[in-house]
């Protein structure tokens, strides 16, 4: 009998920034899929939970010469020396060796937030408040994803529940590998611009693997050597230049006014 | 021997016990329990159980009517996705539509009728019975001194026919519509024709060049899935998007060319282009033959030589000439005007100037440009044509279309201090907070609804939105409300059920034997003639399908008038200009799922209602402090705002979002306070795009 775990995959994404129009569909689809609660009254962009946070980044040119880009930023699924995993005292972060997906285990998390400090992409979120939905919305939660509690950290896991569903389907059909069409994260499925391409980067025939090797494809903060599995694509050179520095600078600027 | 118990013994015992306790599991257990307690929440979500099923429907949040696939558990949808290969929505659902199933459970949802004790911000919202509401509203209709108006904000549905029939039976009844801003250029074009009974649409798919004066083509316009598809196919289709706009909006940011202009000069630029096309390039085509007043028009255009207006428009004449030349050499083009969901239309003069370019270029009645489709509209009185201070009873069917409606626009038509306004809407929002009665109708996905042809569509379409959610007790269908009012008024007026009306419409489409039916489940289209009976057609529509009519093949060449009304040149800008903008569907607080906080509150992707965007130079010139709150002032009053610096905004402009409030549960007083729209001056032509304003730091 074939086993689903025989083949090792490296799931990743390529986001075409020239196609992304910042509509927010990916962020909303992700929120619904993963039972992320609506904002608490006091929540803001630092304390809220947005597994996909879409940043509007401009080239800082004055009107009318400016250019800007929408950058969906979420867990970059670092493969090498995964910063959040290395600092977690609870082993609440782990990498699935069969998929390369960096997972977060809320049951183990004690809420120390070291991982949030370590993450160079600011892609981890802390549950400062009890999650709240209106009564009717509670009945509309995704039955395949457990909501998280106050006091724990959460983040994108490439819609892990969808991977489970795809594996179950493959196993039921007696197949050794999942059908790539059965496993697409909610953001990729919902993007109206088709700007998000998801797939197995270790499969050279996958669209994601091909796109990740294209000329104008790059990764954010690649100089850190964490080998993220999320790639970005843009023909605009200023975006690529900014990719090495902008995100860290933005947060620093916020802190120091 | 008896040993006495001393104080020291007691202290030793207490000390020993305390020390011993440390070696028992108790303190550690307490520590653990308290840690667990802090991580517990009062409200424990209970996930629904049961098999996961899917059901098709169509989104009714805006007129586009995108096809959706609902993933349900325990009979309720938990996820909505698009339908692949759909000819219009192209497998996409916008961010708002993805969370459309939450709106039934919105914090501002109402499921019983309410009455306000007055119109002021302090007036109380009182739960009321439906019978008493209907009796009082009927009595007001019976004794109305002025007109009784039903304002249909989502026209051409089968319900619209009922509204029209009801008002026709009243002596003083008027059935009115507020046109969607998306079709303002088309409406201007229709008015220019001698023949009035025509319906026009944009053939975006086949056009070569789209020139938009401020229309948010790439930010929710029309059917968003289609527009993004066309945008992304530009490499192969060679389609060009050109945006003419003062602010660098999302569409301007992505367009192939953005032509920045001074605010309020769109009409002048349109006439500049017309001048170059007719007087310099000497463009002549078949369409021009239809113009009755071409020579007079050409003469008037001499006031709009690009060099003469350069100072007012801020555009170099060379840019205008290049654009005119590109348009003249394009095989097909579409030029359309203002449709900002928050800022509304430019006004008739400007829209006519823009629409006229399509006639000059021969774009009307041509494939890949502006096409005629069979007119199936329910004839209505346009809202601007209703005389001011003439309405006694206004019933607003506020099935939201996603476009802002300033309360001032409604108020100016009411007889002062002697009117009753009723909203057929299941939410407390910026409009219903001003009215007298809120009659809660069913909301999205709670009842069967028909989806007529969206404004601007090149062909007629029809779909049915299947309910996905149970209808709550206390709500009423809008036509049932009308039926009950008619009954109290002893009118001879019987109304068929929604299902019966939709069936009738389906039968009438079936009898034409035209067009094709796209099925959501298999992604296949088949000609209508291949469907054996009308009942089959109806059941397929119910199961999830869209009927798409054939394109009109005839060339529309009719007599028209190009008469360009003199467009006033904007006066020199000595004050700051307040320009509202919005995102379709996000212009009120009730039309967004609470989880849209991810875009408005928990990130800065979209601006909240109280944040204004200003150029950094303007902020510095006005000596404002970006980190402090500020006070925005116009003739209408003042409101506190937050300032955000943005290089996308021109100098001396305050760009204000007409958007949701920072959280989903504002009070009525908050809703009645001044907001972006109420700060704007609604002019006599019904526009509110530009208002003089001032802004200052808020002193503590």
Image (cartoon, coloured by chain):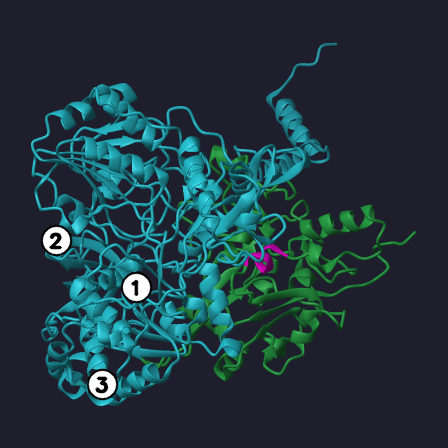
Instruction: Mark 1 or mark 3: name the one nearer the start of the chain.
Output: 3
- Which residue reaches farthest right? A1
Q: Find residue B627 and name its label.
A: 1
Q: Are marks 2 and 3 on the same chain?
A: yes
Identify the residue shown where x is 55% and y is 55%: A125
Q: Is residue B563 above or below residue B628?
A: below
Looking at the picture, how far across and down is residue B36, in whole percent?
Answer: 61, 38
The green-coloured chain is labelled: A
Snapshot quadrant of residue A223: bottom right
- Tell me the quadrant of the picture where the C terminus of chain B can be found: bottom left
Point out the stretch of residues depicted in magenta.
A185-190
Q: Looking at the image, which is closer to me, A68 or B363?
A: B363
Residue under label 2, please give it.
B636
Q: In this view, does B125 lie above or below B352?
A: above
Colour assignment, chain B: cyan
Identify the residue shown where x is 13% and y is 53%: B637
The prevailing secondary structure element of the residues shown in magenta is helix
Q: Find residue B276 and name its label.
A: 3
Snapshot quadrant of residue B25: top right
Q: In the picture provided, is A2 more to the left or to the right than B60?
A: right
- Which residue reaches farthest top? B1
Q: Are marks 1 and 2 on the same chain?
A: yes
Alpha-carbon span between mark 1 and mark 2: 25 Å
**Residue B499 in view of the camera:** yes
Alpha-carbon span between mark 2 and mark 3: 41 Å
């Amino acid at each position: 009998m074939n086993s689903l775990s025989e083949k090792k995959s490296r799931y990743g994404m390529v986001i075409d920034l020239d196609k992304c129009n910042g509509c927010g569909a990916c962020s909303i689809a992700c929120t619904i899929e993963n039972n992320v609660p609506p904002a608490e009254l006091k929540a803001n962009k630092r304390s809220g939970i947005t597994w996909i946070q879409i940043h509007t980044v401009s080239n800082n040119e004055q009107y009318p010469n400016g250019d800007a880009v929408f950058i969906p930023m979420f867990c970059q699924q670092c493969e090498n020396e995964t910063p959040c995993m290395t600092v977690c005292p609870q082993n609440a972060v782990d990498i699935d060796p069969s998929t390369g997906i960096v997972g977060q285990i809320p049951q183990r998390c004690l809420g120390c937030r070291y991982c949030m400090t370590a993450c160079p992409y600011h892609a981890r979120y802390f549950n400062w408040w009890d999650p709240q939905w209106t009564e009717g919305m509670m009945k509309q939660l995704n039955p395949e994803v457990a909501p998280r509690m106050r006091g724990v950290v959460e983040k994108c896991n490439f819609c892990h529940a969808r991977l489970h569903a795809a594996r179950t389907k493959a196993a039921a059909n007696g197949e050794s590998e999942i059908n790539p069409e059965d496993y697409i994260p909610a953001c990729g499925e919902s993007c109206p611009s088709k700007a998000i391409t998801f797939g197995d980067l270790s499969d050279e025939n996958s669209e994601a693997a091909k796109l990740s090797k294209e000329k104008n494809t790059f990764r954010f903060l690649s100089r850190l050597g964490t080998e993220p599995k999320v790639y970005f694509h843009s023909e605009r050179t200023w975006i690529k230049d900014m990719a090495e520095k902008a995100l860290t600078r933005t947060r620093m600027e916020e802190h120091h006014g | 021997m008896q040993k006495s118990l001393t104080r020291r013994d007691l202290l030793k015992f207490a000390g020993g016990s305390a020390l011993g306790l440390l070696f028992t599991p108790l303190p550690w257990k307490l520590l653990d329990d308290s840690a667990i307690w802090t991580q517990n929440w009062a409200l424990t979500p209970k996930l629904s159980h049961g098999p996961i099923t899917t059901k098709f429907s169509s989104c009714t949040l805006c007129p586009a009517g995108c096809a959706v696939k609902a993933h349900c558990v325990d009979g309720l949808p938990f996820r909505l996705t698009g339908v692949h290969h759909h000819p219009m929505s192209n497998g996409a659902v916008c961010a708002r539509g993805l969370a459309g199933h939450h709106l039934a459970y919105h914090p501002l949802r109402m499921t019983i009728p309410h009455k306000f004790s007055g119109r002021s911000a302090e007036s109380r919202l009182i739960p009321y019975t439906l019978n008493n509401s209907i009796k009082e509203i009927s009595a007001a209709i019976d004794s109305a001194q002025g007109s009784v108006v039903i304002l249909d904000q989502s026209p051409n549905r089968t319900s619209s026919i009922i509204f029209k029939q009801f008002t026709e039976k009243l002596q003083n009844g008027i059935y009115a519509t507020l046109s969607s801003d998306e079709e303002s250029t088309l409406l201007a074009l229709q008015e220019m024709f001698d023949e009035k009974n025509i319906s026009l649409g944009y053939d975006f798919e086949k056009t070569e060049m789209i020139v938009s004066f401020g229309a948010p083509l790439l930010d929710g316009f029309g059917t968003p899935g289609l527009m993004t598809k066309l945008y992304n196919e530009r490499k192969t289709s060679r389609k060009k998007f050109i945006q003419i706009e003062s602010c660098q909006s999302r569409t301007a940011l992505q367009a192939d060319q953005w032509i920045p202009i001074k605010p309020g000069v769109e009409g002048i630029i349109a006439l500049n282009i017309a001048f170059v096309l007719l007087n310099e390039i000497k463009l002549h085509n078949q369409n021009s033959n239809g113009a009755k007043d071409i020579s007079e028009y050409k003469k008037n255009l001499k006031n709009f030589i690009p060099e003469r207006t350069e100072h007012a428009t801020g555009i170099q004449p060379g840019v205008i000439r290049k654009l005119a030349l590109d348009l003249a050499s394009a095989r097909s083009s579409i030029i359309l005007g203002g449709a900002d969901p928050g800022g509304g239309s430019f006004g008739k003069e400007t829209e006519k100037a823009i629409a006229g370019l399509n006639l000059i270029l021969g774009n009307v009645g041509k494939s890949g440009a502006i096409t005629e489709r069979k007119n199936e509209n329910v004839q209505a009185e346009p809202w601007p044509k209703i005389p001011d201070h003439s309405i006694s009873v206004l019933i607003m069917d506020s099935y939201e279309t996603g476009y802002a409606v300033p309360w001032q626009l409604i108020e100016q038509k009411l007889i002062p201090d002697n009117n009753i306004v009723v909203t057929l809407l299941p939410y407390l929002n910026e409009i219903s907070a001003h009215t007298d009665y809120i009659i809660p109708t069913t909301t999205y996905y709670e009842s069967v609804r028909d989806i007529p042809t969206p404004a601007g569509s090149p062909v007629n379409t029809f779909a049915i939105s299947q309910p996905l959610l149970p209808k709550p007790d206390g709500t009423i269908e809008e036509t049932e409300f009308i039926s009950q009012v008619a009954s109290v008024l002893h009118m001879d007026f019987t109304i068929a059920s929604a299902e019966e009306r939709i069936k009738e419409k389906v039968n009438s489409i079936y009898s034409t034997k035209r067009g094709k039916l796209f099925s959501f489940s298999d992604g296949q289209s088949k000609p209508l003639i291949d469907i054996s009976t009308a009942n089959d057609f109806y059941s397929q529509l119910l199961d999830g399908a869209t009927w798409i009519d054939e394109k009109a093949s005839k060339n529309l060449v009719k007599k028209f008038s190009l008469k360009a009304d003199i467009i006033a040149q904007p006066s020199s800008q000595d004050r700051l200009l307040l320009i509202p903008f919005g995102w379709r569907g996000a212009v009120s607080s009730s039309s967004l799922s609470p989880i849209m906080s991810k875009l408005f509150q928990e990130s800065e992707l979209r601006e909240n209602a109280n944040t204004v965007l200003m150029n950094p130079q303007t902020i510095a010139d006005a000596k404002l402090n970006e980190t402090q709150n500020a006070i925005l002032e116009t003739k209408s009053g003042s409101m506190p705002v937050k300032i955000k610096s943005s290089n996308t905004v021109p100098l001396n402009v305050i760009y204000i979002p007409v958007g949701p409030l920072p959280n989903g549960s504002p009070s009525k007083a908050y809703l009645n306070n001044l907001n972006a729209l109420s700060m704007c001056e609604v002019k006599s032509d019904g526009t509110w795009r530009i208002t003089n304003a001032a802004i200052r730091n808020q002193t503590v």
